[in-house]
Amino acid sequence: MITIHDTTMFPPSLFAPDGATGTGQEHAGPAWDLSGEYPSVTSPDYTADMDRLRGLITQLDAMSKPIAEAVPRAAGLDPAKDRAVVDACQAFAGRLVEAFTLQGNLAVYANCSSSVDGSDDAAKTARGVLQTLGAGIGAAHAAFKLVMALCPDAFFEAFLSSETTAPFRFSLTQERKLKARFLPLDVEKTLSTMSPDGLSAWGSMYNNITGTVRCQVKKPDGATDTLGLAAAASMLKKPDRALREAAWRGINAAMAEHRESFASILNSISGWRYAEAGLRSHTEKVHFLDKALHQSRIGLATLNALMDALRASRELGRRALRAQARHYGVERLGPWDILAPAPARGGAGPGIAFKDGLEVVRRAYAAVDPSMGDFVSDMAKKRRIEGRVLDRKRPGAYCTEFPASRNPFVFTTYQGALSELSTLAHELGHAYHCEVMRDIPLVEADYPMTLAETASTFGEAALGDLLAKDAADPGTVFDLAWADAQDAATFLVNIPARFEFERRFYEKRPSGPVSAEGLCALTREAWEEWYGDALSDYDDYYWASKLHFHMPGVSFYNFPYSFGYLFSLGVYAKKDELGPRFHTAYVGLLRDTGRMEAEDLAAKHLGVDITKSAFWEGAIDMVRAKVERFEGLASS
Ligand SMILES: [Zn+2]
């Protein structure tokens, strides 16, 4: 099962976190030990670092003055004549890394603390303060960004010539690609000044409505529960089919009630983006997909190759849904079934104690390379895994890294269920990714969402392989195959349908706002195209209930999921092909994820061309084998 998790350093969750499915406290995981990072948010160490960060921001402000003065003539800067500006930029960059490292370190600690105890007010306060300080770094950094984007190549090379600044090459070169789209400094400032109560406000409004909306869930026993959206959404993952349908109907009624507000939000966010793209199109036309492609570090040819391969194999995702339907004893699944767990088999298994589960993950990792197995043991020995069941703990799982020590930590709640074991293998994959990048400068370690799930999905695949070979219990084999089938339907059908909806919406938007009815119709069209007859009905209000369409910071926050899933399978496929040479190639690939475009990365380390559908079709062949195995189980 591919766990799409939420974390501080990785993107937010695609689905609501897993509900607790385990068998109890006796299997619970260990406590992590963060004391090597800070003693507590109220400790003198933490407070001293907070003060040091404030000092750094004041310095950055002062240091940005001469850089801001150079902005109007940025395009003509000369490294010889403007040596003082080169020096100012180099000094600024060094201090900037210090500030980001410290801000990140404090924020990760505060976040870890409040994850374990949601009522920790000191941690919450620290998070709020750090958000403001983070915005302060952003503001101080604006002039530097502009100069770096707009300056001539010779000036840029002079800036990169020192040891501290050399690692900036990749990330700033990415920014420089957009130089023809920059606006004059005062316009850039105006846009960012207006945005909190403009663009961003629409996202807050979405969160406010969905955070307070009440869903009436008419349960199969006749009683009606009034639930918040998150609680109702978590029922979509329960084994009771009638309960799932009731929850889905309750959610949709609530979405329909607020449809005018949600339609305003989507139209305003897209309208703002169109207006901004219009301003930025002074030299070359900005397309609505450009920003998402840039953030994903892929080109349009790669996206097209991926979507073509997905379109050609959507029947495979539908087959997975049909096989799942047979298991629920129905002709077709409903839209309330797409997150359904395997049907209950009458009594859960005994559950897997944490130390036994960890040993299974260790063996799975060691089967790839002994050093990977050692890494898993080390994470446990150094107490970098949090797995307890605690009252005030937040749900979900994530991996995070302290930017100062570069130590990764895994957060999860472990109660012995198989899905939780997969989550552990997943998060340890993220941690392994951090570990192999330990010595890489932070500015070269920031990978895009398309590549972020490579190591985690790989870890799950390794676990799945080991369990499929080892599992004597047919129930475990079936649960694994069910999860594989669900992944196939999610990544081959659901995610592409989201993309197709958003694409159609953006194509229509320039002719005026699209009504709520129009948005329902567009969703239906997209679902019809991808799901076909595999479902008994479509999810007309998916455009309203799915957070991802309403996020101001990112558009087309969908295709990176299918990209990541298939890319990871492509990497995993190389394991057998490369044999003993695989591990070195794998580590090399992970180390370059923050300093290469995806196309170059894949060519260099895997020898494949991801701009061609053939690569994606090869990965889909692996999904086909999984779906066929599930079909075999489903019919037996
Ligand atoms: Zn992940």
Image: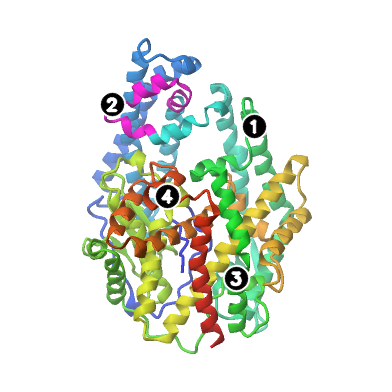
Residue type, mark 4 in image: Ala
Q: Amino acid at mark 2?
A: Ser
Q: Which numbered disc, 2 or 3, marks the residue that appears first in the sequence?
A: 2
The answer to whether residue 604 is left or right of residue 308 is left
The image's mark for residue 602 is 4
Q: Which residue is mark 2?
A: 162
Q: Where does label 1 land, which residue?
A: 285
Label placed on residue 196: none
Dot 1 amino acid type: Lys
Residue 162 belongs to the span the image colors magenta: yes
Q: Estimate how packed mark 2 is, as few (under 14), some (14 to 19) or many (20 or more) residues with alpha carbons within 10 Å.
A: few
Of badges 4 and 3, nearer the viewer stands 4
Q: Residue at x 50, y 16 (%)?
A: 72
Please name the residue shown 36% across and 23% down the image: 157
- Whether residues under marks 4 and 1 lie with C-beta atoms below 8 angstroms apart, the answer is no
What's the magenta region?
A: 144-169
Q: Disc 3 designates what residue?
A: 338
Residue at (35%, 44%) from the top-left corner? 445
Find the residue positioned furthest to the top.
81
